[in-house]
């Protein structure tokens, strides 16, 4: 008699946007999910605590480990928190997996913001650039992964995420901030919305699509790092125009341009050829993403 082994996945940062969509995706594929977060979840704990991480991995021996925990900000004020969560957290996961669960497939989230951006599409061969403490932590995480992969043959994968949104996005991010304003526009007739440079261009991917790219990547045997993005850029003005048009308004009647706004870049766009060659392409368009977020109240 052959007993069926239930596959298990351990997700650090399960309550965030990506962790939530991945949990839903994995459960749909009959994979048992062990969720970890510093807020309410199956296991409350901090990925920067090695004893907590190692005990969890030793106890569950997961088939997959996903590290999504991070502060989604490049601000210098989060320098220590991002170092602890991304840098130290990565070390903790990799060392615990090496000791107790070396056959686990481990995914680490990377970022478009850790690359040098000269305005051209960023691909897997683009050099890193330490533009912020956040980028530094992400870069350290990559070199940690490569060390454990090369030295100990751990199956460590990295997906470099370009901008992606969903109804779960926090209002710290401009796309969701615009959505929330429009959803409440009838109550905000006389309230102006302050915004920065509307000519900035970036990608508008859907987080639900991106976790499918993650799943595609971690089930490879020879490809371990990939850019995850749409490869298509739109301006903030494009987003404003489409979203305000859905309520028959002009964004220019409701927004004030902050001329002192310091933009991080003019354009941030990917070349996702590696993940495309593995068979993944985004299925949610720019307008479909906007509609999805606008209709979620």
Image (cartoon, rainbow, N blue to C red):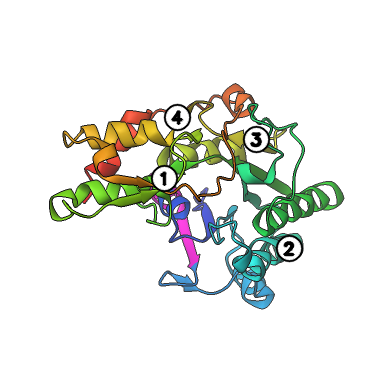
Q: Earlier in the sequence, mark 1 or mark 4?
A: 1
Q: Please name which of the two marks, 4 or 2, marks the residue nearer to the observer.
A: 4
Image x and y of residue 271, in percent: 61, 26
| Label 4 crowd (10 A; few <14 / some 14-19 / many >=20) | some
For the residues labelled 1 and 3, say whether their Cβ atoms are less than 8 Å apart: no
Q: Please name which of the two marks, 1 or 4, marks the residue nearer to the observer.
A: 4
Frontmost residue, 265 versus 41: 265
Residue found 41% across the figure and 44% down from its top? 165
Q: Mark 2 points at which residue?
A: 91
Q: Is residue 226 visible?
A: yes
Image x and y of residue 150, in percent: 84, 46
Residue segment shown in magenta = 22-36
Q: Mark 4 points at which residue?
A: 234
In the image, is residue 25 part of the stretch drawn in magenta?
A: yes
Image x and y of residue 275, in percent: 60, 29
Tell me the SS state at disc 3.
Answer: strand
């Amino acid at each position: 008699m052959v007993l069926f082994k239930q596959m298990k996945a351990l997700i650090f940062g399960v309550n965030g946007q990506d962790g939530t969509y991945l949990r839903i995706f994995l459960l749909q594929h009959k994979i048992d999910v062990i969720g970890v977060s510093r807020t309410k979840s199956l296991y409350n704990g901090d990925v920067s605590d090695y004893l907590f991480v190692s005990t969890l991995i030793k106890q569950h021996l997961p088939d997959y480990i996903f590290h999504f925990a991070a502060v989604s900000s490049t601000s210098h004020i989060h320098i220590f928190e991002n170092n602890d969560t991304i840098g130290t957290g990565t070390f903790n996961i990799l060392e615990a997996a090496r000791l107790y669960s070396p056959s686990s497939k481990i995914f680490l989230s990377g970022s478009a913001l850790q690359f040098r951006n000269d305005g051209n599409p960023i691909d897997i061969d683009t050099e890193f650039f330490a533009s912020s403490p956040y980028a530094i932590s992400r870069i350290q995480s990559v070199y940690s992964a490569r060390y454990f992969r090369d030295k100990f043959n751990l199956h460590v994968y990295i997906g470099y995420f370009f901008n992606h949104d969903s109804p779960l996005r926090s209002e710290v991010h401009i796309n969701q901030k615009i959505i929330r304003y429009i959803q409440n526009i009838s109550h905000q007739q006389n309230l102006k919305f302050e915004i920065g440079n509307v000519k900035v261009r970036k990608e508008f991917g859907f987080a639900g699509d991106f976790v499918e790219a993650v799943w595609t990547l971690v089930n490879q045997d020879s490809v371990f790092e990939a850019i995850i993005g749409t490869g298509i850029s739109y301006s903030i003005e494009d987003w404003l125009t489409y979203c305000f048009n859905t309520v028959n308004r002009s964004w220019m009647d409701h927004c004030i341009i902050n001329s002192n706004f310091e933009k991080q870049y003019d354009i941030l766009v990917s070349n996702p050829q590696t993940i495309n060659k593995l068979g993944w392409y985004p299925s949610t368009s720019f307008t479909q993403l906007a509609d999805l977020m606008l209709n979620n109240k």
